[in-house]
Amino acid sequence: MHEAGLMASVLEIIDQSRVENNIRRVTEITLKVGVLNGALPDALQFAFDALRSEYVWLDASSVLRIESVPAILLCFECQYQGPGSEMTCPACQSVLTQLIQGEEFDIVGFDGEVDEPSKYPALQEPLGRGGH
Amino acid sequence: MHVDLHQDVWALNNSEGNHNREWLDDHKMWAVNIMGSPGAGKTTLLEHLLPILRKDFHVGVIEGDVATSKDALRISALGIPVIQLETQGVCHLDGRMVKSGLRALEPLHLDLLFIENVGNLVCPADFYLGEHARLGVLSTVEGGDKIVKYPTLFRRINALAITKTDLLPFTDFDMDQASKDFASLGAGRPLFPLSKNEGISDLAQWIRNMALNMSTTEQDV
Ligand SMILES: [Zn+2]
């Protein structure tokens, strides 16, 4: 399965954003995963647990939250819009349909603890930049 | 502190795929990604297609394999250039791996490229490699329920080859049902039943037409 590689990508993306936001410890990560996506929630959770020790900004209490997104089908013939995991419209049997959700794999965001403010205040914006 | 990201994880691989597609188009090379279970007959299918298509094209193969080079050796025995990509245990090819394969093939000036993906019905479908078309391979001995069980792959292919149809009398595979199931996942895509002696020229013709028109299918991942 490819969940380990995907989870590693997720953690790399979060690591970058964490540094930019001065976050020392990440407490919760939220993913949105469509039910028709090839990535399985259980395997993602397993991969997260396997990888967490490789990142100092994660610890045993850090949580992975996976929001499951149901599949929604749109029919171009009868305008049906609703549940459906196959491409045939459950209302009129047309195959002129399109999945409008259910395949996504998004990092929604994360929660973390910000670094303690330094004893030494950060330098002010350098003079001479910007307007007034 | 809460940080909103709203970042698509697939976007990372898709951008690699997009780069590959640009490279292929610049080199006027048409590429088809072949996906199916281990043992579905992907390499055997290539062994039958390549001698036909090499009459019209400079053809080459990228072989994705978890660990061995057995399939690549079968292709090179035909005198067709083949690049072996060992995935080191990974269950699919991704954009970055294929990029290195393309670089290795560059001096050969190919115009038709087959990418045989790792044998797997789940993972390869999620990774866009930059290919122009995707061909699924399903054998009658795998059982008729594979299409409904693994809809993602069968939804994301442009044509389906059903191999080993001479074994139909010995399996519970129902060709009509398979064809209905396949159509229910997307209309208008051809299905090629293949036996030892039949069907291969129709499939070769489909590939030839697609490649000559440099037909492009939108990436749908
Ligand atoms: Zn309908």
Image: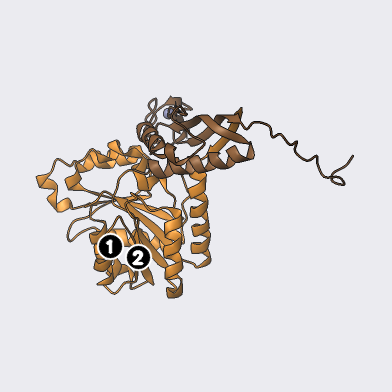
Chain colours: A brown, B orange
A52 is higher (above) or lower (below) than B71: above
Q: Quadrant of residue B117?
A: bottom left
Marks 2 and 1: in contact by CB < 8 Å? yes
The N terminus of chain B lies in quadrant: top right
Q: Nearer the viewer, mark 1 or mark 2?
A: 2
Name the one closer to the observer, B65 or A53: A53
Specify whether B166 is left or right of B84. left
Q: Residues within 10 Å of mark 2 (few under 14, many from 20)?
A: many
Name the one closer to the observer, A7 or A27: A27
SS type, badge 1: helix
* Residue at horizontal 24 percent and vertical 67 percent from the top: B74
Q: How many marks?
A: 2
Q: Are marks 1 and 2 on the same chain?
A: yes
**Residue B143, numbered label:** none
The chain ID associated with circle 1 is: B
* Residue at horizontal 69 percent and vertical 34 percent from the top: A118
Measured from the top left, where is residue A123 in percent x and y? Answer: 78, 41
What amino acid type should be assigned to the residue bearing mark 2? Answer: Val
The residue wearing badge 2 is B61
Could one spot residue B134 in this view of the protein?
yes
Split into quadrants, the picture shows ligand 1 in the one at top left
* Residue with the most extreme front position: A119
Q: Quadrant of residue B44?
A: bottom left
SS type, badge 2: strand
The chain ID associated with circle 2 is: B
Q: How far is disc 1 from disc 2 in space, using C-alphas?
A: 9 Å
A57 is higher (above) or lower (below) than B44: above
The residue wearing badge 1 is B46
